[in-house]
Amino acid sequence: MHYPEPISKLMESFMKLPGIGPKTAARLAFFVLGMKEDTVLDFAKALVDAKRNLSFCSNCGHITDVDPCHICQDPQRDRTTICVVQDPKDVIAMEKMRDYTGLYHVLQGAISPMDGIGPEDINVPSLLRRLQDEEVAELILATNPTIEGEATAMYISRLVKPSGIKTTRIAHGLPVGGDLEYADEVTLSKALEGRREL
Amino acid sequence: MRIDRLELLNYRNYESLDLAFSPEINVFIGENAQGKTNIMESLYVLSMAKSHRASNDKELIRWETDYGKIKADVYRKYGKLPLEITLSKKGKSAKVNHLEQRRLSDYIGQLNVVMFAPEDLNLVKGSPQVRRRFIDMEIGQISPLYLHDLLTYQKLLKQRNHILKQNYGKKIVDDVMFDVYTEQFIEAAVKIIRKRYQFMDLLQKWAEPIHQGISRGLEQLQIRYQPISGLQPEWTSKEMASFLEQKLAEVRKRELERGLTLVGPHRDELQFFVNGYDVQTYGSQGQQRTTALSLKLAEIELIKQEVGEAPVLLLDDVLSELDDYRQSHLLNTIKGSVQTFVTTTSVEGIQHETIQSARLFEVSQGTVKE
């Protein structure tokens, strides 16, 4: 099938998005042809704006349209607690909980020598600067429970320990509301390791 | 456990095959290169989701076809359990009781097999790698947690080696990072060592009387698992960890020179002693063979104890390698309790009653006749 060039170019652009193959791209492209010109212009502008106006917060490394980001600016927030996460998506997950009122620090990755990622390649130096400048009482390490996430958490806690700031690691184990029988052996053994007295 | 029926579709040299088995002994007779071992291999794949001899799954699919299939009706003590493995050029999928399993690790362990093939004689003679592989495969079959711990260990080893390589011959640039990975590496190493000790103890307990039986009470087999010289099995995890830490500190300079981790379970060794002599160095061919046989028979007992059911035994071309006495000892041990599959070029030299009462299959150029 041969498409006119404007359509094939549009399809090619859609296919750069995750989860979109040639068929979905064709369907989206033809849908755009049927849209009003204003709507299409708004759409295009939204795409460009998202790219142009979003940057990383100079303080915490989270994605933001203002610098410092809304969370860092919020006077209601507890400025003595910082939660360290690997990814901006982790901040959004934590915020959904609506129970954490402290600040964040987004590392944008984890230490992995195999992939050539050292502490300087992720936002560790900026975290250390923050800990010197701000009055921080507790640092919560919420990196992923993978080998690299675990190593990153241990690395940061080693660096921070001499300063006397309390560092904590989030718990891992069974998901809440799930059945014990559906958990895999590894999760179960982790949950058993982290059991506590009632 | 036992296998009642096996169906093969486009597997190796079989276009399609449908066999019903005896719950006791099944013997495949045929000339060389007719497809006897392929049947044994298919049973092994059914258990472990990978072949014991082919490194690439594509080799298992029949020439010029796109996919192959192994289907079987397995019976365990609580009833029938249909298993199915589909091999395609893109990968493989496994079904238990007609349900597709998301992870292959959920599949492994549904059917336990113990295979004894001519290569297994290398267990005693071969390189330490062969013995480490034996340990890992056997513990993995009875403990899925061990497989996870092993994977973690291997990844940490890779990460740590990478840091060492980056700093080739110099001082470590980021000490804290190296320490963090070393600490995690030690923690994973201790887990592996403890599990291996535990397993070796059990194996020793079963192998010793078996070996005595095979050698007519003349030989005393001792299995010695030696992770790092100086490490004591009765130590706590903490004591083992601080010992490893000390050992790693001692070789730090050499590790940097070579860019490799020099201490840890990836360098473990397993030794076998008969009446106090190292079988690998001083044992005769016959003793090495008997040792390998004792280990395999011990494995059957071990799985029986840990899983609660006897595994299926696969004897690929080894019966003819054993002398009359060992043959009948082996056949007496399995009689009536372990479903067994045997391949051989002829049954003539084998007098034992078990073989006389076995179900015989004739294998010739990719067809099987009862």
Image (cartoon, coloured by chain):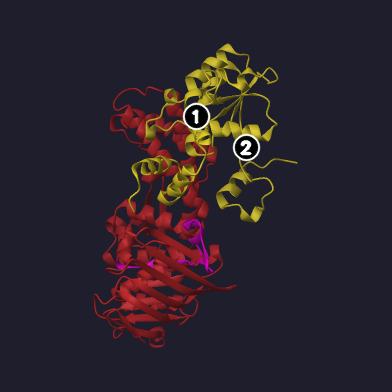
Chain colours: A yellow, B red
Q: Residue furthest top?
A: A133
Q: Position of residue B60 (x, y in %)?
A: 32, 66
Q: Is residue B252 above or below residue B364?
A: above
Which residue in the structure is indicated by mark 2?
A171
Q: Nearer the viewer, residue A194 or B85?
A: B85
Amino acid type, mark 2: Ala
Q: Where is the C terminus of chain A found, in terms of image quarters?
A: top right
Up/down of B226 relative to B99, above or below: above
In percent of width and height, residue A103 lies at 62, 23
Residue found farthest to the left: B32
Q: Residue furthest right?
A: A198
> What residue is shown with label 1?
A45
Q: CA distance from mark 1 to mark 2?
A: 43 Å
Q: Chain of mark 2?
A: A
Magenta stretch encompasses residue B98: yes
Mark 1 on the same chain as mark 2: yes
The residue stretch that appears in magenta: B96-118
Q: Secondary structure at mark 2?
A: loop
Residue B328 vertical position relative to residue A88 in the rendered view, above or below? below
> Which one is closest to the eye, mark 1 or mark 2?
1
Nearer to the camera, A196 or B295: A196
